Amino acid sequence: MSPRSYKITLAVLGLVSLLLVPFLVQGALPAMYGTVALVVVVAWLLYGVVSSNLTRRSGPS
């Protein structure tokens, strides 16, 4: 995945999670959805950090 599309996807995920926060606070959505969304966002961030580090190492120094 290119860095640009990664940033776009991350921005979309961030916006979606921000939009879900009020519903979670009000209890309109089950807490399970919030937990799953949080895990997905954290996993996506970790994937981005790891892949960018790997690309930097394998690229020309």
Image (cartoon, grey):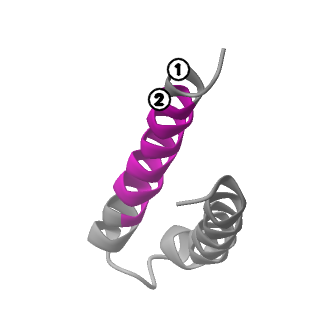
In the image, residue 18 lies in the stretch drawn in magenta: no
The residue pinned by badge 1 equals 57
Residue type, numbered disc 2: Leu
Is residue 5 rendered to the left or right of residue 57?
A: right
Identify the residue shown where x is 59% and y is 26%: 56
Identify the residue shown where x is 47% and y is 29%: 54
Is 23 placed above or below 32 here?
A: below
Image mark for residue 7: none
Q: Position of residue 49 (x, y in %)?
A: 53, 34
- Which residue is nearer to you in this view: 59 or 35? 59
Magenta-highlighted stretch: main secondary structure? helix
Is residue 32 rendered to the left or right of residue 58?
A: left
Is 16 placed above or below 5 here?
A: below
In three-dimensional space, the C-alpha distance between marks 2 and 1, rounded to whole angstroms, equals 5 Å
The residue pinned by badge 2 equals 54
Magenta-highlighted residues: 37-55
Is residue 9 rendered to the left or right of residue 37?
A: right
In the image, residue 47 lies in the stretch drawn in magenta: yes
User: Answer yes or no: do the residues labelled 2 and 1 have beta carbons within 8 Å?
Assistant: yes
- Secondary structure under badge 1? helix
- Which residue is nearer to you in this view: 24 or 2? 2
Residue type, numbered disc 1: Arg
- Secondary structure under badge 2? helix
Is 32 placed above or below 35 here?
A: below
Q: Quadrant of residue 19?
A: bottom right
Is 38 placed above or below 51 here?
A: below
Q: Quadrant of residue 61?
A: top right
Identify the residue shown where x is 54% and y is 68%: 25
